[in-house]
Image (spheres, rainbow, N blue to C red):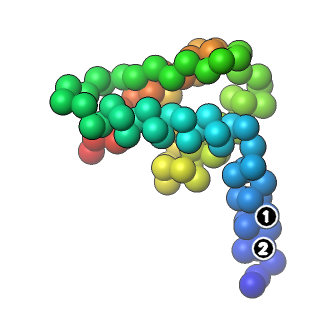
Amino acid sequence: MSFKQEIKDLFTTELLNTSQYQIILNIKQLIIDEINRPNIQEFIIYTHTDMFTQEDIAIIPMVSYLAFGFKLVAIMDSPNIIIDMKNFLS
């Protein structure tokens, strides 16, 4: 394994063990539930139990890339994340 791959794997493992990754998993389930409904909303709102910190705001887009393969297009209005469903419906 190359040094570059080893660093990438360590960084990925670190992100997967963050509380922000759990937020993304909750959002992922919310999105799956929304897609299974007959009338999909253009935007959905995920409400977190606490206010987002600057660390949350910085890390959530990174872990969303790990979960979805692209950066989550959302408006982070603490404690809510407003999710644009267009990326999930194309």
Q: CA distance from mark 1 to mark 2?
A: 6 Å
Q: Quadrant of the C terminus?
A: top left
Relative vertical location of residue 52 with respect to residue 68 in this rendering, above or below: above
How many other residues sit within 10 Å of disc 1, few (<14), some (14-19) or many (≥20)? few
Q: How many numbered circles does the render carry?
A: 2
Q: Position of residue 10 (x, y in %)?
A: 79, 64
Q: Quadrant of residue 62?
A: top right
Viewer-side residue, 86 vs 79: 79
How many other residues sit within 10 Å of disc 2, few (<14), some (14-19) or many (≥20)? few
Which residue corresponds to the image point at 40% horizontal and 35% vertical from the top-left? Answer: 31
Amino acid beneath label 1 = Leu
Q: Position of residue 88 (x, y in %)?
A: 34, 41
Local secondary structure at mark 2: helix
Which residue corresponds to the image point at 51% horizontal and 34% vertical from the top-left? Answer: 27
The reply, left or right, for residue 23 in relation to residue 59 is left
Amino acid beneath label 2 = Glu
Q: Quadrant of the N terminus?
A: bottom right
Q: Which residue is mark 2?
A: 6
Q: Position of residue 32 (x, y in %)?
A: 37, 40
The reply, left or right, for residue 8 in relation to residue 68 is right
Q: Which mark is drawn over residue 45?
A: none
Q: Position of residue 53 (x, y in %)?
A: 76, 22
Residue sitting farthest toward the bottom: 1
Local secondary structure at mark 1: helix
Viewer-side residue, 84 vs 20: 20
The reply, left or right, for residue 36 in relation to residue 3 is left
Q: Which residue is mark 1?
A: 10
User: Does the residue at mark 1 contact the one at mark 2 (Cβ under 8 Å)?
Assistant: yes
Which residue corresponds to the image point at 76% horizontal and 82% vertical from the top-left? Answer: 2
Which residue corresponds to the image point at 30% horizontal and 24% vertical from the top-left? Answer: 42
Residue sitting farthest toward the left: 38
